[in-house]
Image: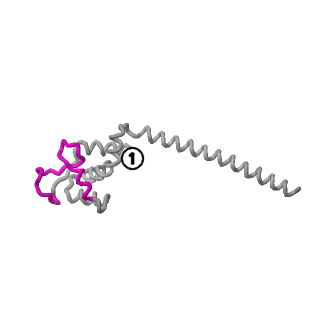
């Protein structure tokens, strides 16, 4: 009979622990929901196409703009170093970041189209690159 009483006490204690755990999990979920809502409210509104573009290109443009802000200017060699750090051997696939000033590209090389590429070529962000950077910074600020 004592074994049944001990077993019932143990089951009752386990049940109490489960109830306490459920309460703690509920509190944790509510705190997480609140934190997510706070982050969501701080994040600038973007349509789906812009959001995808920001997540895909925002960090690389942010790093370029940060370099320019800290150093005053950027060369192709500086840009290449950033892209190699981020993309490793896939750096060749980042050539599509470059275009002309009004093309919608993120970066542009201040040289006439078709001229040979040189490490000391100046690189600048386009207006679109700055816009994407600012949206990325807004979504990733802590």
Judge left or right: residue 140 versus residue 128.
right
Q: Residue at x 30, y 44 (%)?
A: 132
| Residue picked out by circle 1 | 140
Q: Residue at x 27, y 52 (%)?
A: 64
Judge left or right: residue 99 versus residue 61.
left
**Rendered image coloring scheme:** one colour
Residue 2 appears at what percent x and percent y? 87, 57
Q: In which quadrant is the N terminus drawn?
A: bottom right
The one of 133 and 117 positioned closer to us in this rendering: 117
**Majority secondary structure in the magenta region:** loop
Residue 34 appears at what percent x and percent y? 52, 40
The one of 105 and 121 positioned closer to us in this rendering: 105
- Is 104 in the magenta? yes
Q: Among all residues in the image, which is located at the extreme bottom?
A: 89
Relative height, residue 41 to residue 118 (above, below): above
Judge left or right: residue 6 versus residue 49.
right
Judge left or right: residue 39 versus residue 110.
right
Residue 16 appears at what percent x and percent y? 73, 48
- Is 75 in the magenta? no
**Helix, strand or loop status at disc 1:** helix
Q: Residues within 10 Å of mark 1 (few under 14, many from 20)?
A: few
Q: Total of numbered circles in the picture?
A: 1
Residue 81 appears at what percent x and percent y? 26, 60
In magenta, the rendered stretch is 91-120
Q: Residue at x 26, y 45 (%)?
A: 129
């Amino acid at each position: 009979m004592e074994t049944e009483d001990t077993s019932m006490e143990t089951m009752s204690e386990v049940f109490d622990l489960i109830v306490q755990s459920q309460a703690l999990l509920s509190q944790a979920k509510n705190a997480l929901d609140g934190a997510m809502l706070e982050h969501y409210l701080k994040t600038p509104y973007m349509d789906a196409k812009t959001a995808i573009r920001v997540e895909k290109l925002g960090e690389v443009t942010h790093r370029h703009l940060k370099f320019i802000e800290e150093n005053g200017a950027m060369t192709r060699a500086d840009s290449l170093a950033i892209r190699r750090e981020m993309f490793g051997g896939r750096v060749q696939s980042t050539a599509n970041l470059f275009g002309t000033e009004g093309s919608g590209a993120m970066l542009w090389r201040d040289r006439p189209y078709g001229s040979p590429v040189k490490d000391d070529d100046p690189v600048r962000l386009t207006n679109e690159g700055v816009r994407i950077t600012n949206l990325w910074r807004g979504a990733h600020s802590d």
